[in-house]
Amino acid sequence: MNSIVAYIPFLPLIGFVINGLFGKQMSKSMVGIIGSGTLLVSFILSVLCFNQVAASGPIEYTLYNFFSVDTLSIDFGFLVDQLSVWMMLIVTGVGFLIHVYSIGYMHDDEGFYKFFAYLNLFIFSMLLLVMGNNFLMLFFGWEGVGLCSYLLIGFWYSNREFGKAARKAFIMNRVGDLGLLLGIFLIFKIFGSLNYTAVFGALSTVRVEPAVITTICILLFIGAMGKSAQIPLYTWLPDAMAGPTPVSALIHAATMVTAGVYLIARCNPVYSLSPDAMEFVALIGLVTSIFAAIIGLRQNDIKKVLAYSTVSQLGLMFLALGMGAYATAIFHVTTHAFFKALLFLAAGSVIHGMGGEQDIRKMGGLRKAMPVTFWVFLIGTFAISGFPFLSGFFSKDEIFAFTYAHAGWLWWGLGVIGGLLTAIYMSRLLFVTFFGSFRGTTEQEHHLHESPAVMTVPLIILAVLSVVGGLLNTPHFLHLGNEQWLANWFSQIIPISEIHLDAATEWQLMSITTLLALAIIIGAYFIYQKKSNLPLADESVKGITKLIANKFYVDELYDWLFVKPLAWLSKIFYYFVDIQGIDGIVNAIGSGIRRLGAGFRKWQNGNVEYYLLSMVAGIVIVLLTIIFR
């Protein structure tokens, strides 16, 4: 049974090889079947692994010894425990739905086979990341998803701006990856191993200074900040919208951006020893959540709104991690995978129906022409906004409850502000896009149509999951019979964190956030039904609204601080080091040899007189040498 573990990541890799090498000669239907089918089998095998872990505990399987150098021995092995198998289900399950959706969305694209090859390689890398039994395996997967994100974000490479977005994502992630790599080096230096079991087991026997533990935690978190788009390494993620919409769903929902959350949850024994590091994680998460949500209020690109929403929701996950609520963070990862994948794919359905248009100011009234897309988008919006008893309602409430219990009113209030801002910009997005009258061109209006079944069926499945997903971890005081199921599932590797609040206080906190969210949704409906309250044209935006619409000019600040100085330095090095230095030396050597050859050439010109003169000169030199010797 253990041997099936290896098939789970390698099946998508096989799909990548087949589609990458032979996809151009195959039909699009066959490419889609191979790309999606390999992932479906991986999902089924993940379900079997889930059942085995539930019955008999974690599965450890070593494929081979990767290398051994002195005391460092690294296995190419897998650890399938409660945390990794749960992430495997999310990656393969939601990933499969995105693959199926892509068959319809990308059907007319000439790079269809390459797209599915890249998707399969991405899933392989992500599975390697979550299934590996040591930090080096995690790092291989970590770098793999970074490479694949570059390929997918810049998939339409003929557009220069899309290429820039791909490079931006790749470079900013490398900044974070350096922190992760340094953290891994420090772990090996201290513990002499990179294996999870050995490192976490040694925490109780190896004496380590608190400052060193904090340093390790901060370095690992820097890697998480890059992958999971936290301040200051967040600006790549909104620009990643340059990729096709299924890519946005795959990166922003269930896979790449949650890698940082998985990393810290996996390393919870280390983080639990450093209160300072955990407070830092919580602070960054809280600030990111509010900051990104404010920017999302004034975005008019349907995918950009969802992108900043992702950054904000990731901030809430790190807030939970910083409060020690590791299982709660993974709970929100799960519900977020459902409703955010749903929202992105529904946005793709809107874009597909609008003929490529993404500006919500040119939409309106789409609920009549696209009823299925409207209803699933409505469910996704309500779920992320915390509408009662939908998935986001439970996971966000649990984060806020932990925040209140562990940090008090101030942190709780700031976290709730981030959550309420989500309800504002998502309600605005919903009502401006689907309600009112159509504001696009006549051609766009004639083009409006509902997406085909290959796109709408995955949307319906994700909508159902967005409704019932919150039942995985309902709070005790609701008495629904499955209280804290997910937290109990993780309990062997993630200690259950007690909230220490009485039922009355939890009811009070939940009621406040729920009533405020409902009031915002109702208020947004009445506000954005009026044409005078629709988003303004770019040139009409002024003051603080313009500041928010331009994302607080953070990209421009980074451009001024880092991009332009580096570009200036590169031009200087190019001229003085490359052209004048390296090229100058190479050219000088070549020119000198050429001149030397021209001088010696005169001695071999075919003239007998020169040869006789040379012989006489040689004899004279030999005689003089003998005499003076």
Image (cartoon, grey):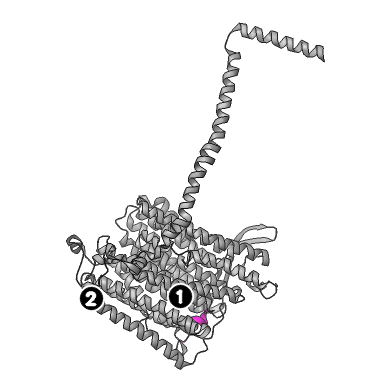
Kind of element beneath mark 1 = helix
Image location of residue 568, percent across then percent down: 47, 48
Q: Quadrant of the N terminus?
A: bottom right
Q: Which residue is mark 1?
A: 316
Question: Residue 467 colored magenta?
Answer: no
Q: Please tell me how many numbered marks the rendered image carries.
A: 2
Residue drawn at (55%, 64%), measured in percent from left and top?
138
In three-dimensional space, the C-alpha distance between marks 1 and 2, rounded to whole angstroms, equals 30 Å
Q: Which residue type carries mark 1?
A: Leu
Q: Which residues are magenta?
A: 483-498
Between residue 320 and residue 572, name the one nearer to us: 572
Q: In this image, 387 relative to 169: left or right? A: left
Dividing the picture into quadrants, the one containing residue 468 is bottom left
Residue drawn at (51%, 81%), measured in percent from left and top?
487
Prevailing secondary structure of the magenta residues: loop
Front disc: 1 or 2: 2
Dividing the picture into quadrants, the one containing residue 424 is bottom left
Image location of residue 207, percent across then percent down: 70, 73
Dividing the picture into quadrants, the one containing residue 42 is bottom left
Between residue 181 and residue 293, name the one nearer to us: 293
Residue 43 visible to an observer of this rendering = no
Q: Which residue is mark 2?
A: 529
Image location of residue 446, percent across then percent down: 18, 62
Image location of residue 503, percent across then percent down: 46, 92
Residue pushed farthest front? 543
Q: In this image, 326 relative to 37: left or right? A: right
